[in-house]
Structure formats: C-alpha cells, structure tokens
Amino acid sequence: MTERIKVWDLPLRVFHWVLVAAVTGAFITGEFGGGLTDWHGRLGTLVLGLLIFRVIWGFAGSRYSRFTSFFPTPAKLQAYLKGEWREDGHSPLGALAVLALLALLVGLATTGLFANDDIAFQGPLFSLIDKDLSDRLSGWHAQIFNLLAVMVALHLIAIAFYFFIKKNNLVMPMLTGHKKAKDHIHQAGDDHVANVSLTRFLIVALVSAGITWAIHDGLQLWHQQTSSAVNTKAQPVRIPNW
Amino acid sequence: MNKTMNKLLIALLLTLTSTATFAGKEEDQQIKFRQSAYSVLGWSTARIKAQVVDRPETFNKEEVQAAANLVAAIANSGLGKLYGLGTDEGTGWKKTRLKPEFFQKPDEAKKVAVAFNQEANELAKVAATGDAGAIRVQFTKVSESCKACHDSFRIRE
C-alpha cells in the first residue's frame, strides 16, 4: 500500500529551485566574465538572500525544513548506517550533505561580497577591506567553488543512485512536495506538518530581503558615513584640477 | 634536540638567503614594473567602468578618453619585455603570480597579449568619439581580453 505524504513545504521547494537557477547562472556568468561579471555579482546577492532565507526557514519553516528535525546527530547517523532509520524528510546522511552544501554556499557568497577580479569588478563590500585581503578572499572564492562543485556532483550522484538502484524518485517530491511512502506508518497530524501559511512565508521573505539589503548596501552606507565623519574633522581634501 | 633545531635553523637561513641571492635582481625589477603597469591599468579600467557602466550620469568624455588612452599606451608599451624567461618566479612589489605555462605555451601567450593590444587600441579609438554606449561595448571586450590572460596564465590566490 503506497500513500502520498507531504514532506517539503512550498517555500522550501521554491528556495531549492531558485537557488539551483541562481547558482547555475552565477557559475556561467562568472566563467564568461566581461560584461556578465556584474550579473555574476547580482546573482551572488540573490544567492546570499536565499541562504539567509533558508537559515531563518530552518527555524520558522514546517517540520522537515527545520534544522532541529534533520540535524544529523551521531545517534541518528548510527541508526541510519545500521539501516534502522525510518523517518521522513532528510536522511541523516542526506542532512550532512545539505548542511555541507549550505555551508559552502555561505562561504562562497560571503567571500564574493569582498572579492575583486583585478579587471573592473569589485564586490559590494570591497571598500571595507584592503586589496590584499580582497585578493586572498577572491582566491578562496574560487577554491570554495571547487569544493561546491564536488558536493553538487555527489548530490546528483546520490539522486541518481536512489532513482536507478533504490527505485526512489527524490526529484518529484522536491517539485510537488509529496513523496510516495511504501512502509510509512501513518501518524496523526502527518498531513499538516509540511504545510505553512502564506503570511509566515511572506514575513520570513521580507526579513531575509531586509537583512540582505543591510549587508549589501547598509554596511557600505554606514562605512561611508563613519569615514566622512572622520574626513570633516580633518583638513578638507581638494583634488587638483590638472 | 637543540642541535637538531640549530641545524634546521641554519638550513632554513641558507635556503632563504640562497633564494634571495639567486632570484635575479633584473627579474624582480621586471616583475615590479609589470605589476605597476597593471596597477595603473586597474586605475584606468575602474575610472572607465564607473563612468560608462556603474554611474552613466557621471560620464565625462575627456576623463574617459584620458583613461582609455592610458590603457592603450600601456598595451602598446612593449609589456612583453617585462616577461623575460624565468620571471614566473620572483618578487616585485609582491610575489609574482605568473604561471610557468606562460613560457611553455608562447603561442597562446602571444595570442592573448595581441588580443589585449587590439581591444585596447580599439577602446582608445571609440573613446575619442565620446559615444558612451559604444565605449561600454568595447570596454567589455577589453575586460574579456584581460580575463583570457588571467584564466590561462595567472595563478589564483
């Protein structure tokens, strides 16, 4: 007897696929460079906003979106490796991969904020640090990307393994929110654990956008104001007109 | 224990001093000059980008033209003379990031260098017209030629 149970709430699914699109777009624009470099920066900001959303959603989302529900504790991992894990949502091993992917993306987005390409691109927070540090962070940015590529490959291999070997389609639930559970023991209230209200989603989305703005523009404005406050105390600097 | 430490220290000192002696002064000077040249290039590309891409309302024909001419002047200055054999190692203002591949694939190195030259000269020509849209298009081509060389011949930090 198979039945459909809802595991992924809609905001989580939207987050997942927009993230896929944004990271792919950032990868392509970063590789091409030139006039697309500015778009690389914009997509990076979008990724940052999505990550902030995901972190908040990890506390405010529905059951299987929450970090507490899937955090891979040693006990859970042990049970999983013994084949005794029977819950819904991220498996403990999958949860490790999810957290690794998120951590790498946070590293990528953060280093990108301070990066420069030694041509004509500077991340929005470049002016807060000196050039040498920015160069180093730009190097890390590239290295973190390599690690991310490995993790994405593992992610896709795992999905293929589930699909072909275990005959379990993991992509469908990420699209529809529902999975087919064969040996699922139905529990009272299970149908509702993956539903969230639109209001909650909108609030979290707005807060995430606000934090993203504060990082992207707010810090810069604050820096400009504090440094211009220092400047007014000193002698006004005139630029020679030759 | 102390003797081993001393030996290690002496070995370290010898290594340091020998690299310092053998890394040629002439090579380091070339690296220093070219790092300076690219630094001035960075100043110029930043000025152009600010006025034609980021804040088009600040576009000033004379300033953009001056910056574009500087880019072209550096491109035409014979930068190749600052890429003597062995200058993939050494320290100018800081350690060079030139890959050894630069000397193993001279044809490819020449190709990216010539491409930069052509795009830079074209940029100076377009800048003289004062057409901000056309400058923007050509500026993109210049930045792509920069990236082509960075991707092939510059070590990522």
Image (cartoon, coloured by chain):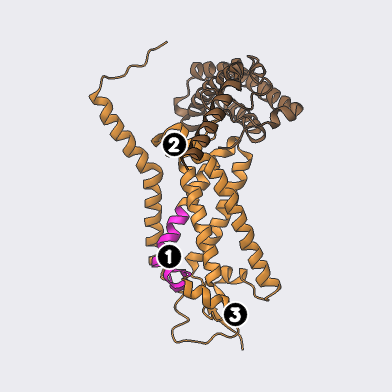
Number of marks: 3
- Residue lying farthest to the right in this orientation: B107
Instruction: Tell me which amino acid carries mark 1.
Output: Gly
- Residue lying farthest to the bottom in this orientation: A1
Classify A241 as above or below A167. above
Question: B55 or A131, which is in the foreground?
Answer: A131
Q: Which dot, 3 or 2, sits closer to the camera?
A: 2
Label 1 crowding class (10 Å Cα cut-off): few <14, some 14-19, many 20+?
Answer: some
| Residue matched to label 3 | A180
Q: Which residues are magenta?
A: A49-72
Q: Name chain A's colour.
A: orange
The image quadrant that residue A3 belongs to is: bottom right
Chain bearing tag 1 is: A
Residue B26 included in the magenta stretch of the image: no
Q: Residue B14 in the image: x percent, y percent?
A: 55, 28
Q: Name chain B's colour.
A: brown
The image quadrant that residue B149 belongs to is: top right
Disc marking residue A58: 1
Instruction: Tell me which amino acid carries mark 2.
Output: Phe
In the picture, measured across the screen, residue A229 lies left or right of residue A106, that is: left
Q: Which structural element holds mark 3? A: strand
| Residue matched to label 2 | A126
Residue A62 included in the magenta stretch of the image: yes
